[in-house]
Image (cartoon, helix red, strand yellow):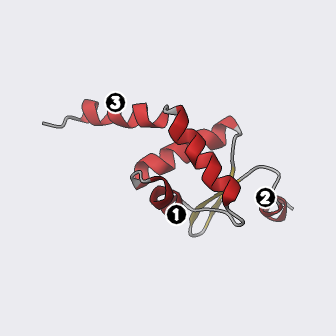
Amino acid sequence: MWTVTSVRVKLESKIRDATLRDKFVDVLKRSKKGCDINYMSDETDVSWPTARAILLELLLEGRVAGTKTTRGWLFFMPGTLREIAITH
């Protein structure tokens, strides 16, 4: 039987998984455009909430850049042309 606590612990262990986090960064490095949460979820075979949590953690750490648009979050690598175009 699933409990809220067991689901939370499982999600937190995935968010802290270094190899999974590196996989997210690798997908963003290969991308020529920014990636949304749906795309990252499909590419890394994790659920949408897990992908969102990992991407927001990476954003807070400064390992990726991101912006909130009218259609949701868009993530990309820091210093890319995409980031420069959005911030200027």
Q: Secondary structure at mark 3?
A: helix
Tell us which disc is closer to us: 2 or 1: 1
User: Alpha carbon of mark 2 to alpha carbon of mark 3: how far?
Assistant: 33 Å
Snapshot quadrant of residue 31: bottom right
Mark 2: amino acid: Glu
Q: Using residue 47 as the reference point, say whether residue 74 is left or right of it.
A: right
**Disc 2 marks which residue?**
83
User: Alpha carbon of mark 3 to alpha carbon of mark 1: how far?
Assistant: 25 Å
Q: Earlier in the sequence, mark 2 or mark 3?
A: 3
- In-front residue for pair 57/19: 19
Q: Is residue 47 above or below residue 3?
A: below
| Label 3 crowd bin: few (<14), some (14–19), many (20+), radius 10 Å | few
Image x and y of residue 24, in percent:
57, 48
Q: Residue at x 48, y 63 (%)?
A: 38
Tell us which disc is closer to us: 3 or 1: 1
Q: Secondary structure at mark 1?
A: helix
Q: Is residue 58 above or below residue 12?
A: below
| Label 2 crowd bin: few (<14), some (14–19), many (20+), radius 10 Å | some
- Residue 39 is tagged as 1
Q: Using residue 3 as the reference point, say whether residue 22 is left or right of it.
A: right
Image x and y of residue 17, in percent:
49, 33
**Disc 3 marks which residue?**
9
Q: Earlier in the sequence, mark 3 or mark 1?
A: 3
Mark 1: amino acid: Tyr
**For the N terminus, which image quadrant?**
top left
Snapshot quadrant of residue 13: top left
Mark 3: amino acid: Val
| Label 1 crowd bin: few (<14), some (14–19), many (20+), radius 10 Å | some
User: Alpha carbon of mark 2 to alpha carbon of mark 1: how far?
Assistant: 18 Å
Q: Answer whether labels 3 and 1 touch (C-beta < 8 Å).
A: no
Q: Residue at x 56, y 69 (%)?
A: 71
